[in-house]
Amino acid sequence: MTVIGVITRGKYGHRLIETVREHSDFSIVTADLPEFVPVFIEEPDEYLEALNFDRRVFSAEIIITYSLHPDLTSAIAKLAAEAGVRSLIVPGGPSRASVPELKKISEVSGMDVEVDEICCSLEPNDFNRPFAELFGSPILKVKTKDGKIADVEVIKGAPCGSTWYMAKEIVGTEVKDAPPKAGLLIQHYPCRATRGEVGGIHESGELHKQAFIKALVNEE
């Protein structure tokens, strides 16, 4: 059985844990970080040690870390690499991670490190399978009847659970209105992606809109 590790911080990461438990048979191990941490952490290894950070999370093959802090994420990446973790997925984007440092760790250890602003853009590779085959960039199967959406099956969905929410809420919608509504429903879901004029939740909505268009084209 595939073991997935999730490092939470405050409110971040718990919805992913719920989604993975509901929509897969993966085993999950977790470790928690406090919501409030210093802006700059001079000795992150010592800081983690003082927190009694549960290093059993590094028994996982694939780890998603919501550390959301450049110093902590780099320290976690080093520990993960030393433990033989295959894939480290870092949500939050480059502003929350020291990308050059993570790249060095990846090159030296062979551990795959992916930094994504939003988890619903995650694509599978040789390291993050089978997690990214079930969770990440959405893949849908749609059935229509009498010009309306009759059923939506989520083949692959966002780790936050928004894809499954959209799939349920969109049933009964006119086919012509469904793709833009799919994107809108994603933005209504309480996702914690950034909400500005570009990127973040808007990118997530567009990904789901395009996935819905593709599913309608491929309807059997």
Image: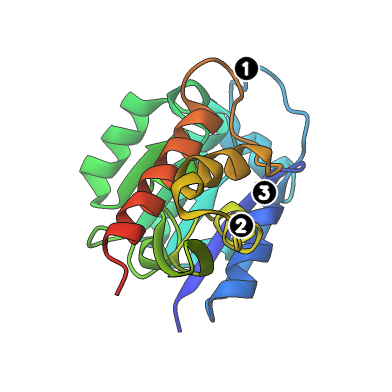
Q: Which amino acid type is shown beneath numbered disc 3?
A: Thr
- Residue 161 image label: 2
- Is 161 placed above or below 184 here? below
Q: Secondary structure at mark 3?
A: strand
C-alpha span from label 2 to label 1:
32 Å
* Amino acid type, mark 1: Phe
Q: Amino acid type of disc 2? A: Gly
Quarter of the figure with the N terminus: bottom left
- Closer to the camera, 212 or 154? 212
Residue position for label 1: 40
Question: Is the residue marked by circle 3 packed among few (<14), some (14-19), or many (20+) residues within 10 Å?
Answer: many
Q: Residue 100's x, y, as percent?
A: 32, 25
Point out which mark residue 116 bears. Answer: none
Q: Is residue 21 left or right of residue 131?
A: right
Number of the front mark, 2 or 3: 2
Give the label, 1 or 3, closer to the camera.
Answer: 3
Q: Residues within 10 Å of mark 2 (few under 14, many from 20)?
A: many
Disc 2, SS: loop
The mark found on residue 8 in the picture is: 3
Q: Earlier in the sequence, mark 2 or mark 3?
A: 3
Asked which quadrant contains residue 130, the reply is bottom left
Q: In this rendering, which labeled residue sits more in front, label 2 or label 1?
A: 2
**In x, y percent, where is residue 147?**
47, 62
The residue lying at 73 percent from left, 27 percent from top is 37
- Relative height, residue 199 to residue 220 (above, below): above
Q: Residues within 10 Å of mark 1 (few under 14, many from 20)?
A: few
